[in-house]
Amino acid sequence: MSDTTPIVTVAVTARNEAAAIGNCLRSLLVAQRAAEAALALRFRIVVVLDECSDATGSIARSFSGVETLVSRGGIVEAQRSVAGARPFVVFSDADILVGESALLAVCRTMLADPALQVAYPRKSPLPPRRRTLLAQALYSYNRTNGFQDVRRYFNGKFFAIRDWRVPSLSELASRLAQLPRDAFYDFHAGMRIDDIWLSRDILARYGESAIHEVEDGEILFRPPETFTGMYRTYRRMRLEIEQLNILFPETLPVHQARKVDESALARASRRERMLWRWFHAWLRVCIARYSLERWYYRRWSPQPCPAWPRVEESKEALCRDIAHPG
């Protein structure tokens, strides 16, 4: 390749991901080789260390060809440190495995259509290690996408984006000034989740055709396997959606309210339908607990609600052996 070959930045955002980041980087380096062999591109792989206090940084620095940067303030600020690079940026979580064709697929798709804003691969759950019925139900839900209808939001685990834009805390000042302090919704902490806001922003500015899920690439992840993990995942998603609804009511018209595809559910096996019902039974418990927690912190608690607890079982070492590319 010549010195004029475009360089695509691939940013892996990580906070205390020592258990998973090694295999994530191994898989990503394999995907990089496949993409560079097929495309007139080079890749700059950067691990953005978000206030790490474990061995994440030393593990990342042990990989040849991997850069590290230091960031503060969460995943959005970690992304902000590299956003804006051209022709586009690929963002990856640190607790996933990147399929060999995933990087090639999203980059080829972005290069083929300069008007496309986001491309992302399908995500597939790793089989559960716990034998409980709930673990099986959570795995089935993630594997079947909950038998829900067409997706317009993209998942934030691995995606290429051309026009990344998330308001900073200073840019939110005028909106925040109109909101009271709230012990449950910590608006004044700034933006904290990437894919929900970015999906709404891209849909509002560019329309549905600007987001595309590629079919010939995938990433693997470990979904929650316990009620604690399920609830923390649900709480994080719902809290961010409600905060966005209050902060940015103009994005409500593009909010995706997904429904169950009854025909797909009817075609599913008896076991899958049983697991789907078991998942929804526990989902009702999540909804009730969330409502109680919101009521408690807004009405009684002298302390603000602690935000963003980790889903520990999804951070455990990803168990697929991947050869180190050298």
Image (tube, rainbow, N blue to C red):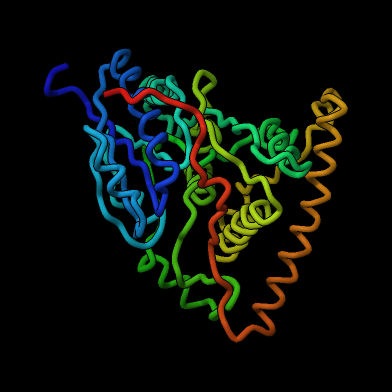
- The C terminus appears in which quarter of the rendering? top left
Measuring from the top left, give residue 1's x and y in whole percent.
Answer: 17, 16
Q: Residue furthest top?
A: 38
Instruction: Find residue 37 and report its horizontal and vertical position in percent.
Output: 29, 14
What residue sits 26% from the left and 40% below the top? 85
Quarter occupied by residue 117: top left
**Picture layout, residue 204 above or below residue 41:** below
Residue 10 seen in the current view: yes
Q: Quadrant of residue 89?
A: top left
The quarter holding residue 263 reads: top right
Question: Count of labels shown?
Answer: 0
Q: Residue at x 44, y 24 (%)?
A: 102
Image position, residue 11 (x, y; %): 33, 41
Whether residue 148 is visible, yes or no, is: no
Q: Note whether 150 is above or below 95 in the view shown.
A: above
49 with respect to 116 (left or right)? left
Residue drawn at x 64%, y 32% is: 127
Q: Is residue 270 left or right of residue 31?
A: right
Q: Which of 240/51 is in front? A: 51
The residue sitting at 28% across, 35% down in the picture is 45
Q: Position of residue 186 (x, y in %)?
A: 53, 71
**Residue farthest along the left direction in this orientation:** 3
Q: Nearer the viewer, residue 215 or 209?
A: 215
Above or below, 300 relative to 107: below
Horizontal side, residue 5 vs residue 133: left or right: left
